[in-house]
């Protein structure tokens, strides 16, 4: 079966009815199956490991005492040069690997990963490459476990040119394909799809080109659209009802998706969501962040610009918002909320709370009550943050420091954080036993000079020139010291330890019960630190810089650690596209001018185990073409 559908094909009421009937018929079963798969250490079933998105593994075969013995067990090259973000999935002994554009998908049998089980290589519109903001990246895949005999297990993949495809997980055959985004206006797809019940959630990219951001839920069986909700515009299109922000009316309620924009500016206002999701089945709420408004030059878009830069809690079945917390009023449009959301249950001030924690690009790490949106904590990611003086907790708004403003007719200098933020796409982790979040953050500041420009569909709509460089703790003369890794407690608001990195740990972290924190760095190192002290216990030099995040799984009784290598993404655009102007790449080229001295391009996967144990070390003749050796000279 193959379906090729477009957005226009979803208008009929009959299609919607079909989608909803498919959604509610067996949703609980499919949802429960995915939850159970995620609990099994033999699987890595979804981005962030499970619905909490905490990327914490309960496996401890690899621990602080033996991590020094990690060796490469096997590897895989995708043959592509652009950045490799995200992480592979593992389901029932099969690994599913995604690549950068053209978004190839590979399946490997873990009993013999040297042979490709199947591969899917889509033919995409090459024009997508010209409108991609920050390299040709893709943040991963999703898996849907079948609940009937008619629909196979599915691998869901997003493509840069705006298409979403469902593949038969057993064969790789295309099951359906649907157009989600229109590259003619600059709307692309870099986000990992996210399966909840019998729907797959798909975000959008392209705010830098004035794309109006939205999230769409598709029925995984039929490819029909169940709902689509926007970040800006009328309440019904945003998903705002009578009970929205009921517990926190000071955040804003009805009518603001239009009223807080000048004229029709909301139609090209940004608010895309290209990052990570989390889901609480007990509340039936999906958590994610909307992106920044456009253009970056705030003088061109007066008002509060709702609901961009907003941490959102949406009902999974309807898409309606339960609550939405916009992190600040109008500011330079460089601080999206699209980055990771991690769920935890903790006791704060004597109260047992269900929390969502979000380290933001604006230099603040937010913790909210995920039931009603109450702001619980808002701490600076680093003591060098200077764009804010503090966070006013009652309205939940950070107070701007006018000395480091980004207003028109003013060249701001030494603004910390930069447009790249003190946190970007890194997928962080949370250790529930230690109560610590392990954060891979940036340490980058900037000079900022805004200018006016007209909107043109499909062209960059920014309105500022940026120069970036290391923060105060870095080596500004040599453009080093651009990243940090930290251990943070949302209960105390304190950092247990932190360490500087030469370049940003752009990909993110993974924590394990073995007392370890793993992460890659842009200069090509894969590291393991003691989760309690931050002590470096092990590292490995990869073929290229890492912008993916670590994962782990068990196979035949052995714990493995996997990581993509392949430098790129926003910090690598200068290297990837051979750019020299330091203000190019929205300022990233200048900040990472020395990256080329430490790593080069090339993408793939490395898989580690203790002493390199794996299928080929256990049986050297595995998959040999022939084991017969002749000695007669013929």
Image (spheres, helix red, strand yellow):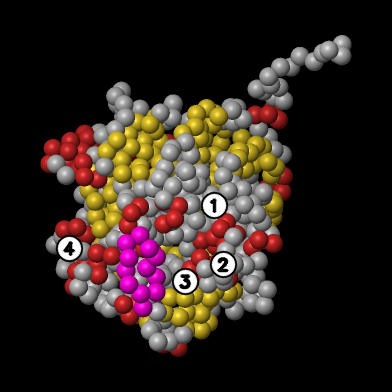
Q: Which mark is residue 549?
A: none
Numbered disc in front, either 4 or 1 = 1
Percent position of residue 490, x then y: 45, 66
| Residue in the image at 56% along x and 67% along y | 589
**In the rendered structure, which segment of residues is drawn in magenta?**
452-463
- The N terminus - image quarter: top left
Give the alpha-carbon distance from disc 4 to disc 1, as whole Å.
37 Å
Q: Residues within 10 Å of mark 4 (few under 14, many from 20)?
A: some
Residue at (68%, 35%) from the top-left corner? 613
Badge number at residue 589 = 2
**Label 3 neighbour load within 10 Å: few <14, some 14-19, many 20+:** many
Q: CA distance from mark 4 to mark 3?
A: 29 Å
Location of mark 1 (residue) = 83
Q: CA distance from mark 4 to mark 2?
A: 38 Å
User: Which numbered disc flags the more N-terminal residue, 2 or 1?
Assistant: 1
- Residues under labels 2 and 3: Cα distance? 13 Å
Label 1 environment density (alpha carbons within 10 Å; few <14, some 14–19, many ≥20):
many
Label 4 SS: loop
* Local SS, label 1: loop
400 up-or-down from 79: above or below: below
> Is 322 located above or below residue 349 in the figure?
above
Judging from the image, what secondary structure is the residue with disc 3 in? loop
- Residue 419, which numbered label? 3
Distance from the alpha carbon under mark 1 to that under mark 3:
20 Å
Mark on residue 234?
4
Does label 4 or label 3 sit earlier along the sequence? Answer: 4
- Magenta segment, prevailing SS (helix, strand or loop): loop
Pair 4/2: label in front: 2
| Chain-order first, disc 1 or disc 3 | 1
Give the SS element for disc 2: helix
For the point 28% across and 49% down, the residue is 216
Q: Residue at x 47, y 63 (%)?
A: 424
């Amino acid at each position: 079966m193959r379906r090729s559908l477009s957005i226009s094909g979803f208008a009929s009421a009959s299609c919607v009815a079909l989608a909803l009937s498919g959604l509610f018929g067996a949703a609980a079963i499919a949802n429960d199956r995915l939850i159970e798969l995620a609990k099994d250490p033999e699987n890595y079933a979804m981005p962030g490991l499970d619905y909490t998105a905490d990327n914490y593994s309960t496996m401890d075969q690899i621990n602080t005492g033996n991590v020094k013995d990690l060796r490469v067990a096997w590897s895989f090259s995708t043959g592509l040069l652009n950045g490799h973000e995200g992480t592979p999935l593992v389901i029932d002994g099969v690994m599913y690997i995604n690549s950068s554009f053209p978004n190839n998908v590979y399946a490997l049998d873990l009993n013999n990963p040297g042979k490709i089980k199947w591969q899917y290589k889509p033919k995409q519109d090459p024009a997508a490459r010209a409108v991609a903001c920050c390299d040709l990246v893709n943040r991963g895949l999703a898996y849907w476990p079948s609940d009937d005999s008619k629909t196979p297990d599915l691998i869901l993949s997003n493509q840069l040119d705006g298409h979403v495809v469902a593949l038969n997980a057993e064969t790789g055959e295309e099951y359906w394909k649907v157009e989600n985004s229109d590259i003619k206006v600059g709307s692309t797809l870099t986000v990992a799809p996210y399966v909840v019940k019998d729907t797959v959630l798909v975000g959008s990219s392209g705010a830098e080109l004035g794309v109006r951001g939205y999230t769409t839920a598709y029925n995984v069986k039929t490819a029909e659209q169940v709902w689509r909700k926007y970040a800006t515009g009328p309440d019904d299109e945003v998903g705002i009802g009578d009970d929205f922000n009921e517990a926190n009316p000071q955040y804003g309620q009805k009518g603001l998706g239009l009223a807080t924009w000048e004229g029709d500016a909301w139609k090209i206002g940004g608010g895309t969501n290209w990052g990570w999701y989390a889901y609480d089945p007990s509340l039936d709420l999906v958590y994610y962040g909307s992106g920044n408004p456009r253009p970056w030059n705030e003088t061109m878009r007066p008002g509060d610009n709702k609901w961009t830069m907003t941490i959102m809690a949406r009902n999974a079945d309807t898409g309606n918002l339960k609550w939405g917390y916009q992190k600040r009023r109008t500011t330079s449009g460089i601080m999206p909320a699209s980055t990771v959301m991690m769920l935890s249950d903790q006791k704060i001030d004597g109260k047992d709370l269900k929390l969502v924690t979000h380290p933001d690009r604006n230099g603040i790490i937010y913790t909210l009550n995920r039931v009603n949106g109450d702001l619980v904590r808002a701490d600076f990611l680093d003591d060098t943050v200077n764009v804010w003086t503090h966070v006013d907790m009652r309205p939940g708004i950070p107070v701007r420091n006018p000395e480091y403003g980004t207003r028109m007719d003013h060249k701001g200098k030494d603004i910390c954080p930069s447009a790249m933020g003190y946190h970007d796409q890194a997928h962080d982790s949370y250790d529930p036993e230690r109560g610590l979040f392990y954060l891979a953050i940036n340490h980058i500041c900037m000079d900022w000079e805004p200018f006016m420009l007209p909107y043109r569909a499909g062209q960059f709509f920014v309105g500022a020139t940026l120069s970036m460089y290391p923060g105060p703790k870095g080596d500004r003369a040599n453009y080093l010291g651009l990243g940090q890794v930290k251990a943070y407690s949302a209960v105390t608001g304190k950092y247990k330890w932190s360490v500087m990195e030469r370049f940003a740990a752009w990909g993110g972290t993974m924590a394990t019960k073995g007392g370890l924190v793993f992460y890659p760095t842009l200069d090509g190192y894969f590291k393991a630190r003691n989760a309690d002290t931050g002590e470096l216990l092990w590292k490995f030099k990869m073929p290229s810089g890492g912008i993916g995040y670590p994962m782990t799984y068990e196979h035949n009784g052995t714990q493995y650690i996997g990581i993509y290598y392949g430098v790129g993404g926003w910090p690598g655009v200068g290297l990837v596209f051979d750019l020299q102007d330091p203000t190019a790449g929205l300022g990233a080229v200048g900040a990472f001018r020395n990256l080329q001295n430490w790593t080069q391009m090339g993408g793939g996967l490395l898989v580690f185990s203790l002493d390199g144990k794996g299928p080929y070390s256990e049986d050297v003749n595995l998959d040999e073409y022939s084991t017969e050796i002749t000695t007669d000279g013929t």
